[in-house]
Amino acid sequence: MNADEDDDITEELLADSEKLTGLSLELLGLDPHPDDMTAEQRLQFDPEDLAEMASAGSDDRERSARQTRLLAGLLWNSSSILIDQLFRDLGTLHELDAVTPEAIAGTSVLSSLPPQFASNYDAKFTQRFIVVAADVTASLARGWAAPGCLAGELAVYCLLDQARITEDIYELDLPEEWRAIVEEVLLEDADSGTLYADGAVHADGASDQGTGKLDIRHWFEPFAPGDAVPPYACS
């Protein structure tokens, strides 16, 4: 990747950051300067934290703000790529005689889902997942709302995987531990991460921890009566 291409993608992502109106830069890890806070906002921090924020030099603050804006733009850009790649995966599935773990391993997005259920990722599943992923990514513009079903949480993991790919390709200057920061905001109290852990739910619904609620049969079910899942996905 040459320097001109790196500069082009950086400027594109910085421009895209303005479109990500559903998450503030502060939620993405940017520490505001105490002088820019209201009295009520300053009360939320310990004096030691305020002193540390105030001690940051202007160059450090400028770089931190640029890194966080770049992260915001990356999330926006990756949302579009995610949906494009899911449609590509759907086209691939239509060409298969049978859905196998080996075939899913070669897909762009479905390969990021828990592999123990790979044989279930057929065209109908993928269509439902696309609808959920589109709904989840729309929250980045309309105002973030936690996913209403487990499939929505998994869509966030897929989104962050795509963001990581773009980061690696272009060697983006992002905040340290950016993925952990974003996961803490977008996946607060999420249980879906255990599907990627050792001893996770198996394809037959069994689990070393007895967490049958994480079985693929329940991925599109609302967590609670007040949680919204697109009708097509939960039908």
Image (cartoon, rainbow, N blue to C red):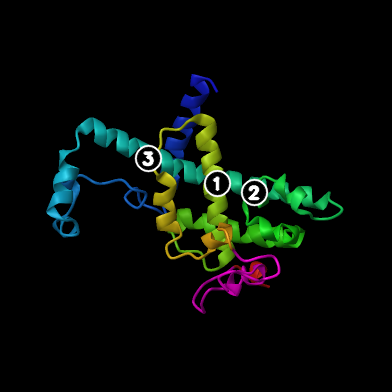
Residue 231 in which image quadrant? bottom right
Q: Nearer the viewer, residue 121 or 12?
A: 121
Task: Count the labels in the image.
Answer: 3
Q: Say which quadrant the C terminus sits in.
A: bottom right
Callout 1: SS: helix
Compared to 129, does 20 lie above or below?
above
Mark sitting on residue 161: 1
Q: Is residue 91 visible?
A: no
Residue 33 at x, y percent in the picture: 20, 44
Residue 205 at x, y percent in the picture: 67, 71
Residue pointed to by mark 2: 109
Residue 114 at x, y percent in the picture: 63, 57
Residues drawn in magenta:
200-229
Do labels 1 and 2 touch, CB within 8 Å?
yes
Three-letter code for the amino acid on which mark 1 is drawn: Asp
Q: Earlier in the sequence, mark 3 or mark 2?
A: 2
Residue pointed to by mark 3: 175
Three-letter code for the amino acid on which mark 2 is drawn: Val
Main secondary structure type of the part rendered in magenta: loop
Residue at 49% in and 77% down: 226
Compared to 224, does 189 lie above or below?
above
Residue at 66% in and 65% down: 202
Residue at the extreme right: 97
Residue at the extreme bottom: 225
